[in-house]
Amino acid sequence: MLDQDVKYLKFRSFLNTYCPHCHNSFNREKQGEQTLNFNALYKKKDMELILSPYLDVFEANATIDIVQDGVLDDLLCPKCKESLVSKETSCGECGSPVGEVIISVFSKLMPFYVCLKYGCEWHGLTKADERRIKLKIPRQDMPEQDSTLRVHNHQEVPYGYTTELALLEAGRCLQCKDPKCVQGCPVNVDIPGFISLVAEQKFDEAAKRIKKTNTLPAVCGRVCPQESQCEERCIVGVKDKPVAIGRLERFVADYERKMDLVKTPDIPENTGQKIAVVGSGPGGLTLAADMLQLGYDVTIFEALHETGGVLTYGIPEFRLPKSIVQFEIGYLKQLGARIELNHVIGTIFTIDELLENFDSVFIGVGAGLPTFMNIPGESLGNVFSANEYLTRMNLMKAYKFPEYDTPMPTGNKVVVLGGGNVAMDCARTAKRTGSEEVTIVYRRSRHELPARGEEVHHAEEEGIKFRLLTTPIQYIGTDSNEVKGAECLQMKLGEPDASGRRRPVPIDGSNFNIECDLVVIAVGTGPNPIIFQTTPDLKRNKWGYIDVNPETNETSKEFVYAGGDIVTGSATVIEAMGAGRIAARAMHEKLTKIRKGKEKKVVGKV
Amino acid sequence: MFQIVRKQSMAKGTIIRFDVNAPKIAKKVKPGQFIILRVNETGERIPLTVADKDPFSGTITLIFQVVGKTTALMRSLNEGDSIKDISGPLGKAAEVENIGTVVMVGGGTGVAILHHVAKAFKEAGNYVIGIVGAKEKEMLILEREMQGICDELVITTDDGSYGRRGFVTDPLNTYLQERHDVKLVYAIGPIIMMKNVVKLTKKFNVRTMVSLNPIMIDGTGMCGGCRVKVNDKTKFCCVDGPDFDGFEVDFDELMNRNSIYMKDEKESLLASIR
């Protein structure tokens, strides 16, 4: 028998196999299909045995008529006729003899065992070998549009994994007993669980596994900063690049959607309690999905004419296709969500008015108010906030002007101010709408760029220039008040500031001009004031955002919860979703108590 | 969808009045507040101030001048047609209180908004003096409505074809010289008119409110397109306004910004004709 630590290897990708004696390959190609050819001895008869290249032993195309549980007498190399049966090892599953072949895993050869019993699917490696193999597989890149091509269209940049690539990548996961990646995920997706389902080619089940805790996998797989969340903690990442969790998530979500496998789960009996969700961005959508699945009535109020919040107006088409956002929202509608567009909460209904008609309210309105630097020339023509620029392009589809009526902001030489993901989005959008030269101006150094590495990389590939350690001090206008240049100062890094990053300090007399005819200011946002104007009793923190109890995300107003950027300031999609989840849990707990009469509801209690 | 229940053409067809079925907004909207609308799927979002409301029948009144593609498209709509999206009410309402004598100055389509605010000041018990200006007689709108609201009404036309010849600032100057009990001037109209009114009232140190209507996309404080310098600070018309203390508004900057968008507007209109 084999060692205890020999296990079934969930490694089903295509293999190159060789004879350990003569080193000839068993791989054959027949009518375009790969097979593995062996000679076998069964009941003293010589036979030819054909296996699939995934080592699915004794497949239907085996030419031997073997009874169930029948064991081959011998397995031989068709070239040198030597027996492949191992003298030291036997099957880890059934104890039958095994044939030993050599497989090539990324140009390294190692032994691999094939059980000789018909019906036994065991192909084995020692655990140490398995680990070695897994660590040998390089992180799989997603195929993507070439940068010279993609700057001329608005289609998504990566095409996503193929099945082959997904299987290879899933094969890299070590299936840790104490998965650190799950702790790194704000919504605690069962990452090893779904990856092992991917490895078993159960893509649909994998998607359902993710959806247990994450309502928007197709979105998260695309826009989550995995490198600073789940993937940052991946054990494989200690020595090699981490498992591409985000890409796998995207793969299964796309698979489920494209194969039309999305099903509405069974919803428990209606609780009779009503929830109002203010804002249809990632936080609101997550809370809505959770509450719908717990049997609550959910109405989502959206201020704009389209749902999705930042997913719709902010993130560009080439990074997150709007059809995917709408598909995910369509799923919520199937769950029973009511959606009220063009409803600006704070004016059409105040929060107190909502509390009269709903049992609980969730505020997820985002942090919309754009920040300007208050330097001269910001009011010149063709100077935009990133919000305005992106809203025109994404929500209003200005890039399709004149098919759509909203004029497209254009410029030959574009300056984008800021170093975050939003700045990258603006710069890359400008490149796609015909700008010749796009420059990102950021006041700190490359090391401090807050944007995701992938976004910076994509931007550079597309020919976007980076002017680091640079800050504008004024914009210069033409006679007709359109911007024609930015006067900048060179900076150097000084002592660390409160954020721990080294503070940029201007170098005196280093003034220089950058010629430009379009400026996009992407230096952050502040809290939107509309709700506060009619709900003065909503407690705010020192930055002006909503103050919540971090355990429950309940605000100073009872039954009113909040989450996302309106609580934290500009953050990520998944963090907003995590906040929605926390609020949903607390809301459900509280409303359940009320339902059971343990607590009496007092409307509008502060 | 928001149905147009009544359409009226004014000022030689350059100004259109719509009564639109929007019951929730009609119930909530206050004088000075505005809405953002999008006519159809490919349309742009434009802000329009609500000229009046009828909470009982659930309609709001929109009065707009045909200046660009969207307003031209709206003119082609008829009673029974619908507007795809209307979002509102937006912006802060005019601060209306009983302060004594108020002069309401309006020009062009600004009169549409002005009369809604004037009505509120009248209802609050103020003595309301109205000064309404237009290019020529045919361009004058809402004269009868203003007559009904104001205790005194002066009409000026640039060419003298009706009322007094000249600009609204002439009778305003007279009033400010003769009456010392004017507590507030409300000016709504073209930027140049508001600028000149403020220039005049500054001399008399009479508090002056102006209502600004710059370019906007979302109208909810998100895009910053409607930014305007007020007291040297960047303010957003959609959430901090649209009404501001006229003494603090940087009108020159506002005019520059508006003129830039007029170019875009022309382009959009031309593109739609092509």
Image: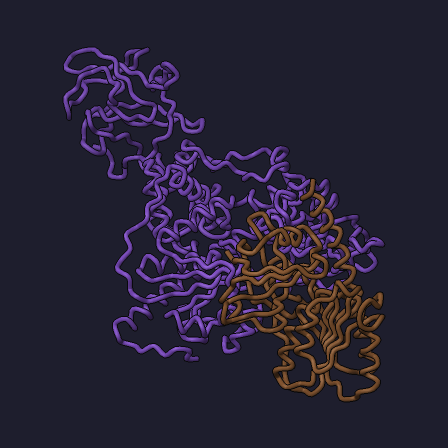
Image quadrant where residue B239 sits: bottom right
- Which quarter of the figure has residue B234? bottom right
Q: Is residue B123 left or right of residue A555?
A: right
Q: Which chain is brown?
A: B
Q: Nearer the viewer, residue A451 or A180?
A: A451
The image's colour scheme reads: by chain
Residue A486: tell me if it is visible.
yes
* Residue A484 screen position, x and y as percent: 80, 51
Residue A80: % across, % down: 31, 11
Q: Quadrant of the N terminus of chain A?
A: top left
Q: Residue at x 84, y 85 (%)?
A: B177
Please name whichever residue, A440 or A204, is drawn nearer the observer in this view of the structure: A204
Q: Is residue A592 left or right of residue A552?
A: left
Which residue is pictured at 56% across the width and 50% down the height? B40
Residue B82 image point, x, y percent: 53, 54
Chain A: its colour in the image is purple
Question: Would you say A260 lies left or right of B154 here?
Answer: left
Q: Is residue A175 visible?
A: no
In the rendered view of the protein, which quadrant contains the C terminus of chain A? bottom left
